[in-house]
Amino acid sequence: MLDINLVRESPAIVEKSLKKRHEKEMLKWLDDLLKKDAKWRKLKQDADKLRARRNKISKEINQAKKQDKDAKSLLDEAKTLPKKITEIEEQSKELQKKINWYLMRLPNILDKSVPYGKDDSDNVVVKEWGKKTKRDFEIKHHGQLAAELGLADFERAVKISGTGFFYLKGDLALLDLALQRYAIDKLRKKGYTLIQPPHLMRRKPYEGVVSLADFEDVMYKTEQEDLYLIATSEHPMAAMYMDEILEEEQLPIKFAGASPCYRREIGKHGLDERGFFRVHQFNKIEQFIFCKPEDGNKYFEEIARNAEELMEELAIPYQRKLVCTGDIGIIAAKKYDIDGYSPREDKYIELMSCSNCTDYQARRLNIRYRKKGSMEKGVVHTLNNTMIATTRFLRVLIENYQTKKGTIEVPKALQPYMDGLKEIK
C-alpha cells in the first residue's frame, strides 16, 4: 500500500504514476482519498480539542467546588463532551476504513526507468542471449512428444482431475525434480536459505501480499475455512514476518522457496490442455529478498541475473524485457520478464517474472526494521523473481533439446541429477 504521508505531501507524484498506468478511474479515487483524508485530519483535531477540554473542565469543576462556586454550567458542558467525542470517533472510523480501502488498491509508484506503454506489446527488450539454432526436422509439441515417449499422461489426469492437470512419469518426472534441485543448489551456494512454506494461507496475510480483487479469480479457496491454496511460494514468504520488526543486522534476508503452486488459470491466456505450459498445478523455485530501501535496486539486478545464469548454464536462448507502464500490475514499481526461446514457434515465451516491490508489500504487511544504533524504524523493501517454474521450463527444454530421432537430450549441467543419464528415450 502507499504511504499516506506521500499521498498527502506529494499527490502529484501519485497522480503522475496513475496517468502512466492509464488508470483514469483511480485518479478519481485519489481525489476522493485526499478529500476524505483532509476531513479525517480535521475530525482528529476536533476530537483532540474536545479531549483537551474534557481534561481542563474536570480541573475547573474541582476548583469551583473547592471555592463553593456554582459549577452547574461546567457540569452540563462536561456531560455533552463524551457524546460529541464518540460521534466524531465514529465518523473518523468510517473515513479511515475508506481511506485504507483506497491505500490498499492504489498501485505502487512506478520507477522512473519503466517505459511508457499500453500493454505487453510495448515491453522493451533490454538484453538477448544465445544462438537460435534452426532445425532440419519438424519439432514436435512438447506434450505430444512426452506422451509418445510414455513420459506424460494427460487423458488419465483429465479423467480424475479435469483439464489443466497431467501425470509426469519416469525420466521426465526425474527431470522435473532435477531442475528444482539444480536451481536450489545454485541459490544455496549464493547464500539463499531454502524454504518450504505452507501451501495454504489465510485471507488477511494474502491481502497483504497481493490485491485479492485482481488475483482471487485465479486462486483456489477451501470451503468452510479461511484458507487459500498458494499461487506461488512468494506469497507465504512475503507474509512470513507480518506485523514484525526486524533488526537492520538481519538484512538482507534471502529465501529460495520450493513449493507446488496452484492456479485456476482463468482468463485471456487459457489452459495448455495437452501440455505443461499453463496448468493448474506446477512446481516452482522462487527467489525472495527482504532488504533495506537503499539496497533494493542492487538485489533486483541480482535476482534477475541469478535466473539468467540458470538459462545460460542450461543453454536456453533468452531475452530480458523491461515491462511497460500498462502491463506491470499494481504491486511492482519495476519489473523484468525473462523469456525463453521456443524453436517450434520461433518466438520467446515468458518463463520468469522479476519484481521490485519497494516498500509496497511490506507496508501492507506491516514489516519494519529497527535501524542500527537507534530506535528509528523503517519499512523494508521486498523483491521476488522466479528461479524456475519447472513445467514452463520443460516446454522450452524439450523443444531445444529434442532430437531428429524423437528423443530428448539431457543438458550436461543436469546429468549429475539424472544418475548420469544423457538422453531420454
Image (tube, helix red, strand yellow):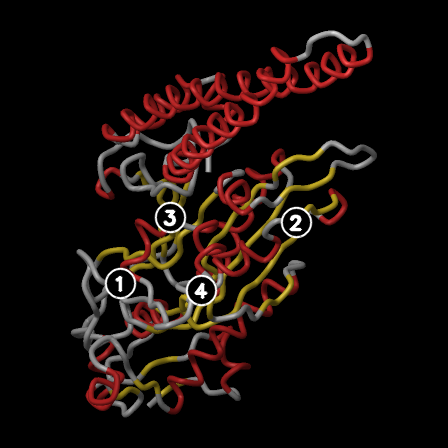
- Cα distance in 3D space between marks 3 and 1: 32 Å
Judging by the rendered image, the residue that carries numbered circle 1 is 342
Task: Mark 3 or mark 1: name the one nearer the start of the chain.
Answer: 3
Q: Which residue is found at the position 28% from the left and 62% from the top?
A: 133
Task: Mark 4 or mark 3: name the one nearer the start of the chain.
Answer: 3
Task: Mark 1 or mark 4: name the one nearer the start of the chain.
Answer: 1
Image marks 2 and 3: residues in contact by CB distance under 8 Å: no
Q: Quadrant of residue 159?
A: bottom left
Residue 308 in view (yes/no): no
Query: Tag 2: residue type?
Result: Glu
Circle 1: is it few (<14), some (14-19), or many (20+) Cα within 10 Å? many
Secondary structure of the residue carrying numbered label 4: strand
Residue 255 appears at what percent x and percent y?
60, 59
| Label disc, if present, on residue 244 of the rendered structure | 2
Q: Which residue is found at the position 31% from the left and 69% from the top?
A: 400
Query: Tag 1: residue type?
Result: Ser
Query: Tag 3: residue type?
Result: Ser
Secondary structure of the residue carrying numbered label 1: strand
Residue 59 appears at what percent x and percent y?
75, 15
Query: Tag 4: residue type?
Result: Ile
